[in-house]
Image: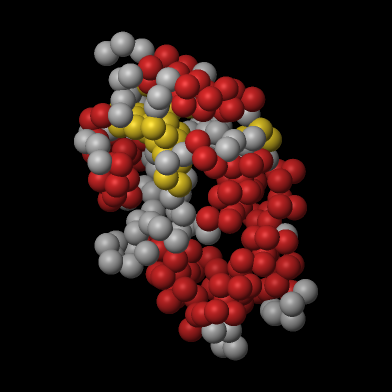
């Protein structure tokens, strides 16, 4: 085994999903859903976007992403307390989020690759940008045909203190895994948000297929590039 732990991005890496298409549809869907609950979707969406941005920008090591989000979001929407807001999002992710599945497509190799790595004894972490609640991540893992149990840790907004592309997000993950950056491999489809892990000393693998287009100044060169299936030989091959 060449690495002690392998970190996988989800969207565009293990699940066929284009965020440029998915996010607008997601916002439209949640706006429509809150409007059926008597809320004005315009202000709701404005606050959702602004509070998500606050979470993305937060550098506070003491506040989890969920707390940053709620502290920003709650004062914006009079009439909703913390419990009501959490409940509202929980219900959306349970009832309506699954409708968005048609915007994704499973990547057949994903299941094979995860199975092969687990079979070889690799420790796997799902390093998906923790801007979503765990429920939304579990849905997408199932859309990908993957088993939640295959990952020893899954980053979500409930358990994370930073977002991609902050290096501290990756620092927290290697610390949590108890490994040095040099013995971890980050696999993803984003030359910026995923490949930046290389700046910490991690090896990186850019997966072809859904590569995000980034300006040259924020496109970090990957250690490896290839198909998802190639990750197995890179991860398990001899040093
Ligand atoms: Mg991705």
Instruction: Name above or below for residue 140 compared with residue 113.
Output: below
The residue located at (46%, 26%) in the rendering is 118
Residue 55 lies in what quarter of the image? bottom left
Q: How is the image coloured?
A: secondary structure
For the N terminus, which image quadrant? top left
The residue furthest right is 36
Instruction: Name above or below for residue 54 compared with residue 175.
Output: below
- Residue 46 can be seen, yes or no: no
Q: Residue 112 location in percent, x, y?
A: 57, 22
Residue 192 lies in what quarter of the image? top left
Number of numbered discs: 0
Instruction: Name above or below for residue 58 compared with residue 234.
Output: below
Q: Residue 216 location in percent, x, y?
A: 37, 35
The residue furthest bottom is 79
The residue located at (30%, 20%) in the rendering is 2
Left or right, 151 with respect to 203, comes to right
The residue located at (66%, 41%) in the rendering is 143
- Residue 168 can be seen, yes or no: yes
Instruction: Name above or below for residue 207 compared with residue 150.
Output: above
Residue 65 lies in what quarter of the image? bottom left
Comparing 10 with 159, the one in front is 159
For the C terminus, which image quadrant? top left
The residue located at (43%, 50%) in the rendering is 155
Q: Residue 36 location in percent, x, y?
A: 77, 74
Left or right, 59 with respect to 164, comes to left
């Amino acid at each position: 085994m060449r690495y002690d732990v392998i970190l996988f991005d989800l969207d565009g890496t293990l699940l066929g999903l284009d965020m440029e298409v998915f996010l607008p549809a997601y916002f439209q869907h949640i706006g429509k859903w809150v409007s059926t609950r008597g809320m004005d979707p315009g202000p709701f969406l404005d606050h959702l976007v602004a509070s998500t941005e606050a979470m993305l920008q937060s550098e506070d090591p003491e506040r989890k992403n969920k707390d940053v989000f709620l502290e920003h979001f709650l004062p914006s929407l009079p009439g909703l307390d913390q419990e009501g807001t959490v409940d509202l999002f929980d219900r959306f992710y349970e009832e309506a989020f699954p409708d968005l599945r048609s915007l994704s497509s499973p990547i057949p190799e994903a299941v094979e690759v995860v199975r092969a790595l687990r079979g070889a004894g690799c420790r796997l972490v799902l390093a998906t940008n923790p801007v979503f609640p765990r429920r939304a991540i579990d849905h997408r893992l199932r859309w990908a045909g993957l088993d939640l149990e295959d990952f020893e840790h899954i980053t979500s907004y409930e358990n994370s203190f930073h977002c991609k592309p902050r290096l501290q997000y990756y620092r927290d993950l290697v610390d949590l895994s108890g490994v040095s950056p040099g013995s971890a491999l980050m696999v993803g489809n984003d030359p910026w948000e995923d490949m930046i892990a290389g700046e910490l000393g991690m090896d990186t693998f850019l997966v072809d297929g859904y590569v995000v287009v980034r300006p040259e100044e924020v496109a970090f060169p990957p250690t490896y590039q290839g198909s998802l299936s190639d990750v197995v030989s890179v991860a398990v091959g001899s040093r």
